[in-house]
């Protein structure tokens, strides 16, 4: 391997959410919250960023931009930005996105917050599939829209869309938007072409907009293919696609995402209301990621594949009642540990106190997630091993 994914990189002292923000995010607490572990002793497997260094090709591009020495007001004028992104989507998903439809946002979640307000009215419903990344709910709550959840069906660890339920909820005339996660966080599903078409048909029949959040689309197992929803739902312009290199290359803090809005009215509304100046370092970084990041990504995916294989074997050996299936996408393992734990308790708190492991789980995923933990596997194998040893010891002790 050309890159060293075993390297342990010190992140403390960089204002990192991962090291310093867990009290606030997981426990809604401040620095007075105490644990039996020091902060630096925790194994951190929670927030969805990686313990791997951003690839050198991106860091070097930022350094070159730094050498230009002025960081005045910036917008994206250089056509190479779009070209790098469009080449990426063409090569990796065989999907062409039009330059005229592309806007940028300081992240996909900021884009969701804006789009919910542009697309829906106060008394309308927004549909999501659960379990769900909680910020989908937050974007809906923030604008005082009504959240409607359609639970995914868990078939032996393989999640499926409940199309009857989805259609029933989409049919409500108050439902005007579906926030769709493709691939899906936290279950790791890559939706098939058939499933995507069915989601598209349901929304089209019921005149429901779709925001397809495809932030995890590059982080898929090496034998899998991602299909953008907009690639297969072609005759409906109420589909918005969100993509970003932020997860792919561990640069979420640079805050720049691409949003594709084919609907002319919505595009005009976005242009009218969105404050579209950019951080010059982020523009450089995103362009470099798409232009030069592929080699690193392909290697990193192999490392992730083997971390998932390691987890699977580890669970089979040490926690055989845990239910786990290697996800098709994401670096997040979704593990059912209900055989070992009282599912009504605060599961992240149990592991922080009893294992010294920071993870997400239980009701952090809106609903339909009781008894599950989510483990971030984008870390050196040695850390994964320690985390799993600690989780196992805590669960064994609990079940003595
Ligand atoms: N959409 C999905 C589906 C995500 O999983 C995340 C990050 C985002 C959007 C964030 O996008 P951004 O605004 O950074 O562009 N997911 C996280 C998670 O599951 N835990 O920590 C972050």
Image (spheres, helix red, strand yellow):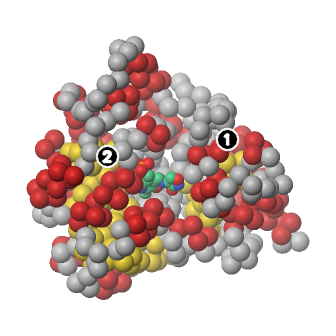
The mark total stands at 2
**x, y percent for residue 68:** 35, 14
Quarter of the figure with residue 198: bottom left
**Local secondary structure at mark 2:** strand
| Image disc number at residue 105 | 2
- Tell me the crowding category of disc 2: few under 14, some 14 to 19, or many 20 or more residues within 10 angstroms, Cα based: many
Disc 1 versus disc 2: nearer the observer: 2
Residue positioned 23% across, 45% down in the render: 103
Q: Is mark 2 within 8 Å of ligand 1?
A: yes
- Residue under pointer 1: 381
Compared with 269, 306 (above or below) is above
In front of the other: 131 or 219 = 131
Q: CA distance from mark 1 to mark 2?
A: 34 Å
Q: Residue furthest right?
A: 400
Does residue 57 appear anywhere in the picture?
no
Residue positioned 33% across, 32% down in the render: 283
Q: Is mark 1 within 8 Å of ligand 1?
A: no
**x, y percent for residue 201:** 21, 73
Residue positioned 31% across, 25% down in the render: 72
| Image disc number at residue 323 | none
State left or right for residue 171 relative to residue 353: left
Instruction: Name which of mark 1 and mark 2 comes first in the sequence.
Output: 2
Quadrant occupied by the N terminus = top right
In front of the other: 69 or 107 = 69
């Amino acid at each position: 391997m050309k890159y060293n994914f075993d390297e342990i990189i010190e992140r403390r002292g960089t204002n990192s959410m991962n090291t310093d923000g867990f009290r606030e995010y997981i426990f809604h607490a401040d620095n007075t919250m105490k644990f039996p572990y020091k902060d630096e002793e925790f194994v951190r497997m929670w927030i969805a960023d990686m313990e791997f260094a951003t690839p050198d090709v991106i860091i070097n591009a930022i350094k070159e931009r730094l050498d230009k020495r002025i960081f005045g007001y910036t917008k994206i004028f250089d056509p190479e930005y779009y070209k790098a992104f469009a080449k990426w989507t063409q090569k990796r998903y065989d999907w062409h996105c039009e330059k005229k439809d592309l806007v940028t946002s300081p992240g996909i979640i900021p884009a969701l917050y804006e789009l919910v307000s542009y697309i829906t009215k106060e008394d309308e419903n927004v549909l999501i599939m659960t379990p769900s990344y909680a910020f989908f709910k937050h974007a809906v709550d923030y604008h005082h829209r009504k959240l409607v959840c359609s639970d995914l069906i868990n078939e032996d660890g393989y999640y499926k869309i409940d199309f009857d339920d989805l259609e029933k909820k989409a049919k409500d005339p108050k439902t005007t938007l579906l926030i769709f996660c493709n691939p899906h966080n936290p279950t790791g599903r890559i939706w098939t072409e058939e499933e995507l078409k069915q989601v598209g048909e349901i929304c089209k029949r019921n005149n429901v907009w779709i925001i397809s959040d495809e932030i995890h689309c590059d982080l898929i197992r090496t034998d899998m293919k991602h299909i953008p929803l907009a690639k297969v739902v072609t005759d409906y312009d109420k589909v918005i696609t969100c993509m970003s290199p932020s997860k792919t290359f561990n640069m979420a803090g640079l805050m720049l995402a691409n949003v594709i809005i084919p609907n002319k009215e919505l595009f005009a509304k976005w242009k009218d209301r969105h404050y579209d100046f950019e951080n010059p370092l982020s523009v450089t970084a995103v362009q470099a990621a798409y232009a030069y990041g592929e080699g690193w990504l392909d290697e990193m995916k192999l490392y992730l594949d083997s971390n998932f294989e390691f987890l699977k074997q580890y669970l089979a050996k040490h926690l055989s009642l845990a239910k786990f299936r290697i996800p098709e996408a994401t670096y997040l393992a979704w593990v059912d540990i209900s055989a070992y734990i009282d599912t009504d308790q605060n599961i992240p708190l149990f592991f922080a106190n009893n294992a010294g492991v920071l993870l997400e789980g239980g009701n952090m995923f809106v609903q339909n997630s009781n008894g599950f933990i989510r483990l971030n596997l984008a870390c050196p194998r040695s850390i994964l091993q320690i985390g799993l040893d600690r989780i196992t010891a805590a669960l064994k002790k609990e079940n003595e």
